[in-house]
Image (spheres, helix red, strand yellow):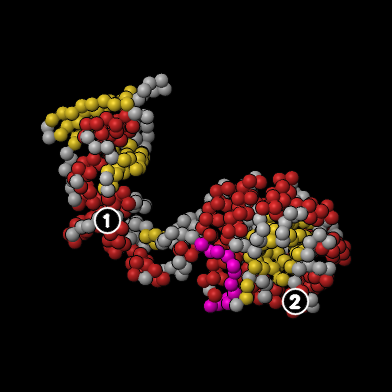
Amino acid sequence: MERIYIFDTTLRDGEQAPGASLNVKGKLEIARQLEKLNVDIIEAGFPIASPGDFEAVNLIAKKLKKPVICALARSLKKDIDAARDALKPAKKPRIHVFLATSKIHMQYKLRKAEDEVLKQAVEAVKYAKRFADDVEFSPEDATRTERNFLFKILAEVIEAGATVVNIPDTVGYTVPDEFSDLIKAIKENVPNIDKAIVSAHCHDDLGLSCANSLAAIKAGARQVECTINGIGERAGSAPLEEIVMAIKTRQDFFNFYTRIKTQELYKTSRLVSHLMGIDVQPNKAIVGDNAFRHESGIHQDGVLKMPRTYEIMKPEDVGFKESKIVLGKHSGRHAFVKKLEELGIKLTKNEVDKAFEEFKKLADKKKEIFDEDIIAIVEEEVKVIPQVWELVYVHTIAGSHTVPTATVKLRKEGKIYEDAACGDGPIDACYNTIDRIVKINPKLLNYNLKAITSGRDALGEVTVRLKHKNTEVVGRGTSTDIIEASAKAYINAINKLLYSK
Ligand code: KIV
Ligand code: ZN
């Protein structure tokens, strides 16, 4: 099996994503995580672009010792000087120089003829070579470059010392068969190609960046340039996680390997998303929240019997804890029973029938059913719990300059109990008072308030999760007054605790 080198450009091409901008500290944090992920090369930035970019490349070069640290430069002395200076502390530095080679770029952007471009590229590589053994050259817009000119410039930059020749599909224009054919043609027509590693750098304008990268390695490329979550200029770059997992999952087809620690993928994805402020779409391959979640009853039944029926990768291999059965209206009885088991709920067959029927009714109204909903169904519809304590009234005082205080009146077996207490807020005061009356002091694990109708007089639903000794219960209460809804939910949970005792 041959190795594929993973060149991560999240901090350079990825940072060119509209709206994404990282400070130096954030870049170092991502670089450290990329090192943990075990990428081979980190393109840390474009030092001439800004003082911040320079500083980030310099800091990353200083702090990271394992991966190759690469800096981008146009084929200009001043850019190469900046890359050299930023990379000074690097243990394994690489200078990456680029120059556009397609007719449209040479004519309209560079306003240069082929021979001028050729000369500039060769001189740039020779100049970069003075400062780094490892020099990469990219003919920008290679996939729209006239082939003979591309072969010629690649041969000459290799002659000048380039160790890696990168083939960018700058505008995401190519398609897998065509790109594969181009890489093969480069291998066949550039006489000294064996002296350099061929690399692929794809963009996602047609949604083909991953497919094109894989086609390139199949055709002879041994380095792929990619970014975490596929972020990058316009529609983005080739997503690292997809390329790596395709190579791993379909090793039977590719017969290659990478050194990526795939268990770090999810964590890296979320770190990049968080620091760049760009969400990962839920259905994103490999790292999207739904990538290992199953909702349909047929799929859930299959996965519960044998995960590989609907999972081609193990979720833990990419850093997800486990695959998730999501209960919703398409879920079947098998998944529902499994969920009851997970929650430690034991029911008779008739009780399961009743609970499943109620679950289906609720699932028709609600997109996703949470554990709390299942517990509530069982407690409210199947095993009806006696309401030992009942709320008679609650009165709270709160404000900017007042100690929050609650007075609560409860009824138990016809007798009225009343007390008052303070708290951190009116709800805390109310819960402290109830604790004093019922004489148990459970731990509040979770409090959730949501509006279940709209408008200013909306009905609020409070859900609380309490723990007392080893028992956990969920209580609910509804009212247009959120303090009353909170008190009702708490008392409902207390009654469940008493019942379980
Ligand atoms: O897409 C591109 O052409 C680039 C080059 C700088 C390699 O990012
Ligand atoms: Zn690019």
460 displayed left or right of 158: left
Where in the figure is residue 452, as x and y percent of width and height? 34, 40
Can see residue 129? yes
Residue type at mark 2? Asp
Residue 383, x across and y down, in percent: 18, 50
Total marks placed: 2
Disc 1 crowd rating (10 Å Cα; few below 14, some 14-19, many 20+) is few
Residue farthest to the bottom, as pictured: 188
Q: Is residue 153 left or right of residue 185?
A: right
Marks 2,1: beta carbons within 8 A: no
Location of the N terminus by quadrant is bottom right
Magenta-highlighted residues:
252-263
Residue 49 inside the magenta-drawn segment: no
Q: From the image, tell me which residue sits under label 2.
A: 194
Residue 125 in the image: state x and y as whole percent: 82, 63
- The residue singled out by tag 1 in the image is 344
Determine if the magenta segment contains residue 257: yes
Give me the C-alpha separation between circle 2 and circle 1: 62 Å
Left or right of residue 354: residue 456 = right
Q: Amino acid at mark 1?
A: Gly
Residue 173 versus residue 450 in the image, above or below: below
Secondary element at tag 2: helix
User: Relative to 394, is 144 above or below?
Assistant: below
* Extreme-top residue of the structure: 401
Residue 417 placement: quadrant? top left
Residue 177 visible: no
Q: Is residue 500 left or right of residue 448?
A: left
- Give the residue displayed 66% in from the left and 56% down from the top: 64
Q: Which element is circle 1 on?
A: loop
Name the quadrant containing residue 403. top left
Residue at position x 54%, y 71% from top?
A: 248
